């Protein structure tokens, strides 16, 4: 995951040799380059706390034209050495909105963006409370990924519940069908020539029915009546 994809990193966050006096100092942000006056999109959305020349004592001394945004976690994102700013204090900025243009105002050796992230907005806009900007942006992206995963899991759970319900409905329908089939089977068995009838009238049974019924089918009651009629006929 490359949070600064497309940017040339000319100086990372951390210790470095100061380009002005050659001593080893901590670089409190990351230096990024596109080209002079490149319109700089906000890496993270937020509310503009400061937009303008960061003079001495502001928390942005030496940073030239600065835009500082506070994100919804309370972290301050500073875009420094801007040629000019394109937002105003109090404005709400979305990720990707242009905050200003790459420049070389303030204590700068050439056109670049000094991007600094601070963990608090006071005092002096969190001056000195810098964090690694790359790590911070990565942690935000990971959180977004986690959110997306959570949403996906929730979606899958909903789908599973729906499938489970569908399965239950199908099973219930199948059970109802099986019951129906069994009832039909029982009815059908009832309509065949019953065993007692065959037993009583033996081999003549089929013969006896010739001319009485066309087919030895019918409900049990019918067979009882046939038997009665047949017995009477034999007696007579
Ligand atoms: Zn810098």
Image (cartoon, helix red, strand yellow):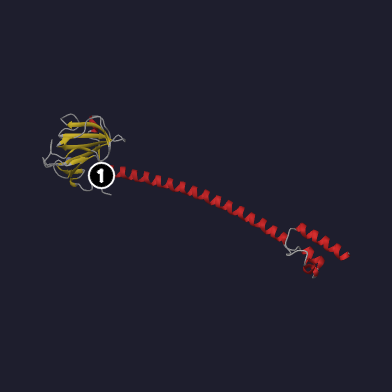
Residue 31 appears left or right of 163:
left
Between residue 50 and residue 122, name the one nearer to us: 50
Task: Decide which of 121, 214 is in the foreground and name it.
Answer: 214
- Residue drawn at x 66%, y 57% is 182
Please identify the quadrant where the C terminus is shown.
bottom right
Q: Position of residue 211 (x, y in %)?
A: 77, 66
Question: In the rendered image of this protein, does residue 57 appear above or below residue 206?
Answer: above
Point out residue 60 in the picture as x, y percentages from the top left corner: 18, 33
Farthest-out residue, right: 236
The percent position of residue 235, horizontal first and vertical second, equals 88, 64
Q: Is residue 193 left or right of residue 234?
A: left
In the picture as drawn, the residue positioned furthest to the bottom comes out as: 203
**Does ligand 1 reach within 8 Å of label 1's beta carbon?**
no
| Label 1 Cα neighbours within 10 Å, binned few <14 / some 14-19 / many ≥20 | some
Q: Which residue is mark 1?
A: 134
For the point 55% across and 50% down, which residue is it? Answer: 169
């Amino acid at each position: 995951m490359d949070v600064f994809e497309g940017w040339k990193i000319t100086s990372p966050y951390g210790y470095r040799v100061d380009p002005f006096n050659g001593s080893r100092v901590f670089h409190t942000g990351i230096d990024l380059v596109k080209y002079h006056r490149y319109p700089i999109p906000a890496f993270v959305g937020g509310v503009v706390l400061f937009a303008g020349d960061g003079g001495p004592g502001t928390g942005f001394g030496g940073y030239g034209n600065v835009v500082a945004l506070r994100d919804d976690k309370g972290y301050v994102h500073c875009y420094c050495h801007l040629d000019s700013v394109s937002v105003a204090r109090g404005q709400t900025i979305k990720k990707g909105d242009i905050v200003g243009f790459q420049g070389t105002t303030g204590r700068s050796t050439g056109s670049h963006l000094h991007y600094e992230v601070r963990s608090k907005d006071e005092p002096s806009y969190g001056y000195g409370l810098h964090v690694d900007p790359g790590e911070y942006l990565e942690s935000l992206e990971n959180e977004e990924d986690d959110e997306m995963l959570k949403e996906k899991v929730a979606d899958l759970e909903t789908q599973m519940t729906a499938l489970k319900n569908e399965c239950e409905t199908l099973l219930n329908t199948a059970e109802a069908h099986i019951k129906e089939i069994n009832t039909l089977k029982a009815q059908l068995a009832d309509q065949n020539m019953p065993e007692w009838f065959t037993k009583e009238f033996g081999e003549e049974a089929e013969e006896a029915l010739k001319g009485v019924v066309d087919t030895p089918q019918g409900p049990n009651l019918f067979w009882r009546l046939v038997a009665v009629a047949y017995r009477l006929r034999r007696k007579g």
